[in-house]
């Protein structure tokens, strides 16, 4: 995850364009259109699932109806993303990540067999069972995920515009040095390690409470939090529920923003959170439509966690195609000049792309 996200960040920094803009200019437009179409669908469903999960969690902790919280959270999310400046919004998201510590605290509230956990982490089991392969693809799809590729590249460009190194997204080439690259790399390493650490604690919490007591089928946020309560207590229940809200508030703008970056650059529209609504109607239009469509997804009979799970699988199947393009761009001196991949980045990138591709092929084979 670190290696792939670092490549995306470097592409954005060096070119002054997002990933979609670079692919459109130098590689296959047909592949780009297809990938952006799938990204838009997956992100919209993902937005819907997150909005639904937050609404359920808010209903559990604060009362009021599910529909009230669904509309309220959707409205707040849109107002923040559309009307706050990029600088302010980035700070808001940064401080919101503190809510993720709820999952770390929850783990230590619950009694754990740390020897078994650490042993199983270092020496994992493996199976060619269909459900196991489905889980592997879903875990990769929600970690090394296409929407993060687009988001990372574009946020580096947003930072360059914010610091005056670039006037507009996709216009001109920013002047960067090795120190800029090192700072971006350190930032990426810390962020990716933290995100994986949080995922680890979520897995440990659910494994040591729900799974241990035979609860293996969870379809809603309310069901997950309520099922946790008898085994972990009131404090763990509240923390886990608040964590769902915090995670959702982080995820929805990233999902909507990454889809909007990809669509806007693909269609040649003005893009960027640094722009105001009147300067980028199309860009903000995609954010609004994707978020409102996500709200409507909650009116279907499909459960939120089911939607999250299968969009993760879809992302896991699509990611290797984009990762191949990212590797090609990262090794193209005409695009990145002296800032192309080193041996380690190429080796690690090739291994994970190959592994995810093989997992995807095995999954399709087992389904067929």
Image (cartoon, rainbow, N blue to C red):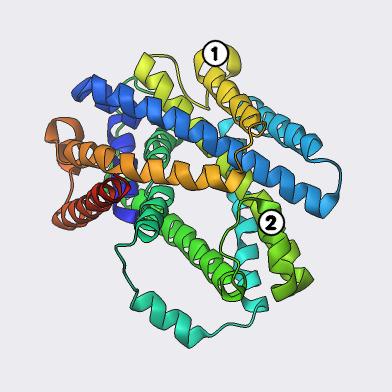
Question: Is residue 167 visible to the viewer in this orientation of the structure?
Answer: no
> Which residue sits at x=59%, y=53%?
97
Q: Quadrant of the C terminus?
A: top left
Q: Nearest to the eye among marks 1 and 2: give it.
A: 2
Query: What SS does tag 2 mark?
Result: helix
The residue where tag 1 is placed is 281
The percent position of residue 94, horizontal first and vertical second, equals: 58, 49
Judge whether 235 appears above or below 311 on screen.
Answer: below
Is residue 214 left or right of 194 when viewed as pictured?
right
- Dot 1 or dot 2, earlier in sequence: 2
Determine whether 183 is above or below 110 in the image.
Answer: above
Kind of element beneath mark 1: helix
- At x 66%, y 59%, the residue is 224
Instruction: Give percent across and percent down for residue 62.
Output: 84, 50
State how far apart marks 1 and 2 are (Cα): 39 Å
Q: Nearer the viewer, residue 56 or 81?
A: 56
Q: Is residue 219 left or right of residue 161?
A: right
Numbered label attached to residue 223: 2
Q: At which x and y percent is residue 27?
A: 19, 25
Residue 334: name its quadrant: top left
Relative side of 262 to 355, left or right: right
At 51% from the left and 36% from the top, the residue drawn is 255
């Amino acid at each position: 995850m670190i290696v792939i996200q670092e490549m995306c960040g470097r592409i954005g920094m060096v070119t002054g364009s997002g990933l979609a803009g670079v692919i459109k200019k130098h590689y296959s437009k047909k592949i780009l259109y297809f990938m952006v179409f799938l990204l838009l669908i997956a992100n919209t469903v993902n937005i819907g699932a997150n909005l639904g999960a937050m609404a359920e969690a808010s209903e559990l902790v604060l009362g009021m109806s599910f529909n009230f919280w669904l509309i309220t959270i959707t409205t707040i999310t849109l107002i923040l993303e559309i009307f706050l400046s990029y600088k302010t919004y980035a700070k808001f998201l940064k401080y919101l990540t503190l809510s993720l510590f709820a999952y770390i605290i929850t783990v230590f509230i619950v009694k754990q067999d740390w020897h078994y956990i650490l042993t199983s982490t270092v020496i994992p089991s493996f199976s060619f069972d269909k459900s196991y392969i489905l889980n592997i693809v879903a875990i990769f799809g929600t970690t090394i995920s296409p929407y993060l590729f687009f988001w990372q590249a574009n946020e580096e460009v947003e930072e360059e515009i914010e610091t005056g190194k670039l006037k507009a997204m996709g216009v001109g080439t920013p002047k960067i040095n090795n120190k800029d690259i090192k700072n971006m790399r350190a930032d990426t390493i810390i962020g990716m390690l933290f995100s994986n650490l949080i995922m680890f604690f979520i897995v440990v919490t659910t494994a040591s409470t729900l799974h241990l007591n035979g609860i293996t089928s969870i379809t809603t946020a309310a069901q997950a939090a309520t099922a946790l309560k008898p085994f972990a207590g009131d404090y763990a229940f509240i923390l886990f529920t608040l964590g769902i809200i915090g995670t959702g508030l982080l995820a929805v703008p990233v999902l909507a923003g990454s889809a909007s970056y990809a669509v806007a650059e693909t269609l040649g529209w003005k893009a960027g959170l640094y722009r105001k609504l009147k300067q980028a109607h199309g860009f903000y239009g995609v954010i609004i439509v994707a978020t409102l469509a996500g709200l409507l997804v909650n009116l279907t009979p499909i459960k939120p966690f089911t939607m999250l799970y299968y969009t993760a699988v879809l992302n896991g199947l699509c990611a290797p195609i984009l990762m191949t393009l990212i590797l090609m761009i990262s090794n193209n001196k005409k695009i990145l000049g002296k800032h192309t991949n080193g041996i380690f980045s190429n080796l690690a990138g090739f291994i994970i792309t190959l592994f995810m591709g093989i997992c995807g092929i095995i999954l399709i084979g087992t389904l067929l």
